[in-house]
Image (cartoon, rainbow, N blue to C red):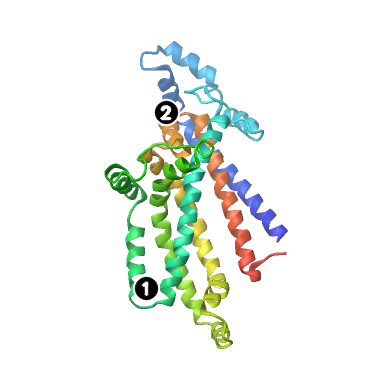
Amino acid sequence: MLTFLLRRVAAGLVLLYVLATAAFAMMSLTGTDAVRNISGNTATPAQVAAKTHELGLDRPWISQYGSWLGHAVRGDFGVSWFSGDPVAASLALKVPVTLSVVVAGLILATALSIVLGVAAAVRRGWLDRVVQVLAILGYAVPSFLAALALSVIVAVKLRWLPATGYVPFAVSPSGWFQSITLPAVSLSIGVIAATAQQVRGSAIDVLRQDFVRTLRSRGISERRVLFRHVLRNAAPPALTVLSLQFIGLVGGAVITEKVFGLPGVGSAAVTASTNGDTPLVMGVVVYLVFIVVAVNLLVDVAYGWLNPKVRVR
């Protein structure tokens, strides 16, 4: 198992390097526009040239990338070209916002997916059909449309929850919970739809196995059969889908944060990429890829725990 995990960590580091290199190469194509945005439309060619030299954009691309990489491996992602704030310190304030929404959405999606999937597998009549219809509808609705609908109905008209803004957990736990509820729900709808269908299919396959009939013949309660044996055997395929959906949650957070006015990584990524703020964009890329790799590694560990047959020693 340890060898397997080390291989996955190494693969994650390679992925991080490749994506960071690709992102830096694409951002280098917008260097002149970024300098113009910083200097302003009234800047003279001499001022633009001076700013270009100050930012080091007049050096060869490989030199720029080598300089950034050398600092990045030490945790120094430079300073934002527009705000002048250190990128690492800025993202340290924004990452908890995004993680709060994404993790809350993932927990909600996991819980509801299990309940709906198992219920649909056990009750193959009208409940199964209702769950499948809801899953199709949920999968078809984009997260940004769900976010807009929830914002208008729940926040603006009913005034049950705030429409915009974020309250740190340290300031007010209840305010934090209220501020992330609507974003988390809007993000989780599509994940619930996809994962519930997977749980349903896997649970049906497990329920047809001989060992389930044997457990029932021994008088073991239906609840214990479902949640201790059936669900554990049906969980690994659902975990795979859930890990893939997590990437979608991170991507969906970019739009969701804009809708609800959250000061997270998604909002920073949109603003930085629009302005051509290379240091901030690169910091966002590294942080998000690291989070995705870490979550997938945890999923691999959970997969091995649930299914000993796939454990690698």
Using the image, determine if residue 151 lies above or below residue 77.
below
Using the image, determine if residue 109 lies above or below residue 73.
below
Using the image, determine if residue 8 lies above or below residue 197.
above
Residue that sits furthest to the bottom in the current view: 217
Q: Which residue is mark 1?
A: 128
Q: Amino acid at mark 1?
A: Asp
Q: Secondary structure at mark 2?
A: helix
Say which residue appears at 59% left-offset and 87% top-offset. 218
User: Can you say which quadrant of the picture contains the C terminus?
Assistant: bottom right
Going from the N terminus, do you reach mark 1 or mark 2 first? 1
Q: Secondary structure at mark 1?
A: helix
Residue 134 left/right relative to 242: left
Say which residue appears at 50% left-offset and 79% top-offset. 207
Q: Position of residue 184 (x, y in %)?
A: 43, 49
User: Residue 275 bears which disc, if any?
Assistant: 2
User: Residue 95 bears which disc, if any?
Assistant: none
Q: Position of residue 127 (x, y in %)?
A: 35, 73
Q: Amino acid at mark 2?
A: Asn
Say which residue appears at 29% left-offset and 42% top-offset. 156
Say which residue appears at 37% left-offset and 73% top-offset. 128
- Residue 196 lies in what quarter of the image? bottom left
C-alpha separation, residue under disc 1 versus residue under disc 2: 49 Å
